[in-house]
Image: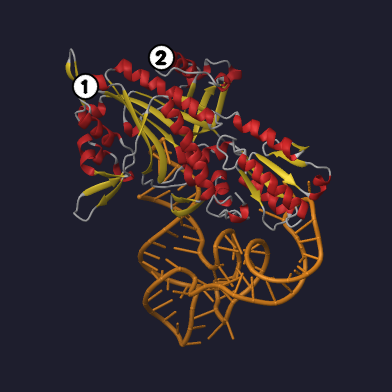
Amino acid sequence: MRLSKYFLPILKENPSDAQIVSHRLMLRSGMIRQAQSGIYSWLPMGYKVLRKLENIVHDEQIRAGHNPMLMPTIQSADLWRESGRYDDYGKEMLRITDRHGRDMLFGPTNEELITDIFRNSVRSYKDLPMTLYHIQWKFRDEVRPRFGVMRGREFLMKDGYNFDLDKASAMHSYNRHMVSYLRTYERMGMKAIPMRADSGPIGGEDTHEFLVLADTGESEVFFDRNILDLHLGDKEIDYNNWEECASIFKEWTTPYARTDETHDADLFSKIPRERQMTSRGIEVGQIFYFGTKYSDSMSAKVSTPSDGEVPVHMGSHGIGVSRMVGAIIEASHDENGIIWPEAVTPFGVGIVNLKQGDEQADIACEDLYKSATILGIDPLYDDRQERAGAKFASMDLIGLPWRITVGPRGLKNGVVELTCRKTGVSEELTPELALEKLTKIYSRLS
RNA sequence: CGGGCUAUAGCGCAGCCUGGUAGCGCGUUCGUCUGGGGGACGAGAGGUCGCAGGUUCGAAUCCUGCUAGCCCGACCA
């Protein structure tokens, strides 16, 4: 993409409404614009990042054997009356009336709808286990939206629901989701720590939430330093293998890790002092096992060979996809702007032409741009009539992990400069070598 | 939902107290010079001062009501 043709409305000054760093940087880098309190338009670059996160989530869900689908944003109040949550949910739920006077709502989550779909089509234990999920916009009418997309009213969430015959099978689903979520975050270039949590309005017995560490996080978290060393890496995982999922689950949930909600000071104090860590964290996902809460109230049953009809065991799981964009920036930025992890960066490399209009520089940049495009590096070429300083500042702000700087000075020696956004380290290379290096870096990402 | 605050050009702000023809910086348009970290000079464009009412000869400024947004707290993915 050529910057001269791209809609990227960068702001030089901080919008006064934005307090925290991710909100500020998302506005300044032209990723989002606020439409109303807690409701945002996603401009091209923000949208691109959002789609990248979505793709990673889909990919890992499908790998775990889950079924992608799409449910509507608007739901019928009747289903929610059936589960009893129409009254319980309170003012957070945006209620709407259609022209016929029917009560509807903008879905804050989908347990009722998915249970309805399930009970209307599944009758036999032979169809179990089954996990369905979708990535869809939700609406929760927060009393006080804040922090940009981190706590908006409208937000994009992946939510999934598992249906199992019994508790043992449902617990495997729980473990499987734990593992697939860990993988998902890792692929996004993020460290998300699973922590024992409260179940809140969803209700249920077992639940963990996933926290990304960041100074501006909304919850205080306590954990054993050892958990920071855990990585799944490229390990092949058999999601149908109960023991394997259970052992990974155990590995990741054994070290102490809790939010202030469930923190137990006594247990925490038993960890060696040098491993006791306190930090702030942003919640980016949560998994629940809630047994037969919805299948009982909504009569979602299957026939079994021996016990007649039994209610299915369910769980639900969510990843806040739009919130994740903010969380990544909170965890990865410096005073000059965003620093994107390579896996989710909107563009693979920024090409900066230091002297637009200089024949040599223009030609070299065009060549680099075309080659990088063909190689799948997805370059953003700053071809604007701007001075070098302005181009550097823009690139730093939008935070592409790599920058190729092209100027007459280097071209005299046949080299360009390849700079890493994160470390600031740069090296002079021929254009060919620079591209080769980038190709290697990006092909590593699965 | 309690407490605090804001609304003036695309963005950031001054002007309001003490009423009298709306201003600054950045951005933007055109031109010239420039060209390795937000450059210089010159010339422009751009605002029913959030909305409605009131006081006044006259309201961005004073008064009343409304709306929107932000911050702290309680609450939440």
Identity of the residue drawn at 34% across and 36% down: A69
**Nearest to the observer: residue A379 or residue B35:** A379
Towards the viewer: A192 or B21:
A192
Q: Residue at x 55, y 45 (%)?
A: A20
What's the coloring here? secondary structure
Image coordinates of residue A133 in percent, x first then y, are 36, 32
Q: Quadrant of the C terminus of chain A?
A: top right
Amino acid under disc 2: Asn
Closest to the observer, A201 or B74: A201
Tag 1 subunit: A
The reply, left or right, for residue A188 in relation to residue A176 is right
Give the CA separation, mark 1 to mark 2: 23 Å
Q: Residue at x 56, y 34 (%)?
A: A343
Circle 2 packing at 10 Å, graded few (<14), some (14-19), many (20+), is few
Report the disc number at residue A241: 2
Residue A158 appears left or right of A217? left
Q: Is residue A103 visible?
A: yes
Who's the residue at 45% across and 50% down the image?
A: A40
Residue behind mark 1: A124
